[in-house]
Image (cartoon, grey):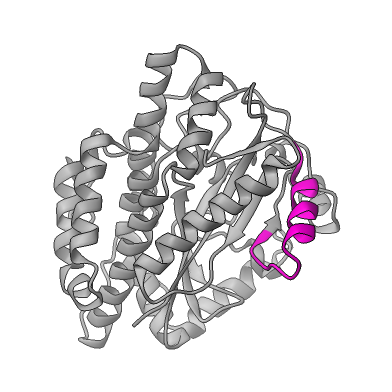
Amino acid sequence: MRTVGVEEELLLVDPHSGDPKALATAVLARAARDDPGQDVFEKELFGQMLEFATHPQADMADLGDEIVRCREEAARHAGRIGCAVAALATSPLPVSPSLTVNERYQWLAERYGVGTRDQLVCGCHVHVSVDSDEEGVAVLDRLRPWLPVLTAIGANSPFWQGHDTGYHSYRSRVWGRWPSAGPTELFGSPERYHRRVADMMATGVILDEGMVYFDARLSARYPTVEVRVSDVCLCADTALLVATLTRGLVETAARDWRAGRPAPDHSVSVLRLASWQAARFGIDGDLLDPVTMRPRPAERVLRSLLGLVGDALDGSGDADRAERGVEELLRHGNGARVQRRLLERTGTLRDVVTECVRRTQG
């Protein structure tokens, strides 16, 4: 059974005003004092962000429990220094990001200028184990057209600096400003993948291999494929759905490779359009069908995804969980839809944030 791990970035906010607070260093110090030896929480690019990583899990129920536990622990540590955590991929309220002080982040700020300051965005990364680089690259080649669907499912960033952007995942549009971010062409072999990474690093435009921000990549630290297209999800159940479908896609792609079925040869230009469409409309409009790259209602695309990975989900015992998750998503919407409904109901972005604080742990 393939193991799965999840990394989530959370926004630190004032529990009353909803304003982002640059208190990550204090939260991490509190976590280290309360739970010596914990290896869950890390600092991120800005002081208003807190990251956690689950342990690899083979059972999705165990993964879901760990996501909830990590969120609760983050909230507990933050609460003891007077702030709260919110699973928001962008801040609905205006914010001036505070760069975390370390050599790497200072290099980014100097190298990329104002573009770095825009990157106060919170994502969800899913790691799925693979047997080898050969299998991993074969999986990357076959995942490409389905990644925008995961973006649409996890979309949770409609607001930016106090305004409605019109997008479901504005985070993904901001993240795409990094020069190394986005979809990739077919690699075909581990040698070509690693040569591409080496060529990118040799340009001097990026700092190191950690800045190879492909939508999906081979992890430099673990024997995994790392899928990086989702916003941090408002609800833990949605994060678990993204992880479940990601494992299903990885297993299906690996089976297709072993069976000799070729990877779809969509161009990067078209894949970028599919990513934009998913970011703009989420699951509330058309997506580009991953097979035909023509517009198709999002509900039908999601059901096609379930059909594609059905055998893999049956094999891991996740079919019922995934089907229920998709039905709940279609009924209640992704995080972006929920945030907009909260604004309609409450009338203020401050109340949107404070309600999202509650839902982060709910």
On whether residue 214 falls in the magenta region, the answer is no
Residue at image coords 76%, 51%: 108
Judge by depth and name the residue closer to the eye, 79 or 187. Answer: 79
Task: Give residue 124's position: percent from left, percent from top.
Answer: 49, 53
Q: Which of the 4 image quadrants contains residue 334? A: top left
Horizontal side, residue 108 vs residue 240: left or right: right
Judge by depth and name the residue closer to the eye, 41 or 46. Answer: 41
Which residues are drawn in magenta?
22-41
Asked whether the viewer can see residue 158, the reply is: yes
Residue at image coords 43%, 42%: 362
Judge by depth and name the residue closer to the eye, 243 or 103. Answer: 243
Residue at image coords 45%, 53%: 229
192 lies above or below 74: below
Horizontal side, residue 121 vs residue 182: left or right: right
Task: Give residue 203's position: percent from left, percent from top.
Answer: 70, 64
Task: Give residue 315's position: percent from left, percent from top.
Answer: 21, 78
**Quarter that holds the N terminus:** bottom left
Residue at image coords 15%, 53%: 303
334 lies above or below 159: below
Asked whether the viewer can see residue 178, the reply is: no
Horizontal side, residue 213 vs residue 167: left or right: right
Task: Give residue 46's position: percent from left, percent from top.
Answer: 73, 44
Q: Which of the 4 image quadrants contains residue 322? A: bottom left
Judge by depth and name the residue closer to the eye, 60 or 289. Answer: 60
**What is the number of callouts on the image?**
0
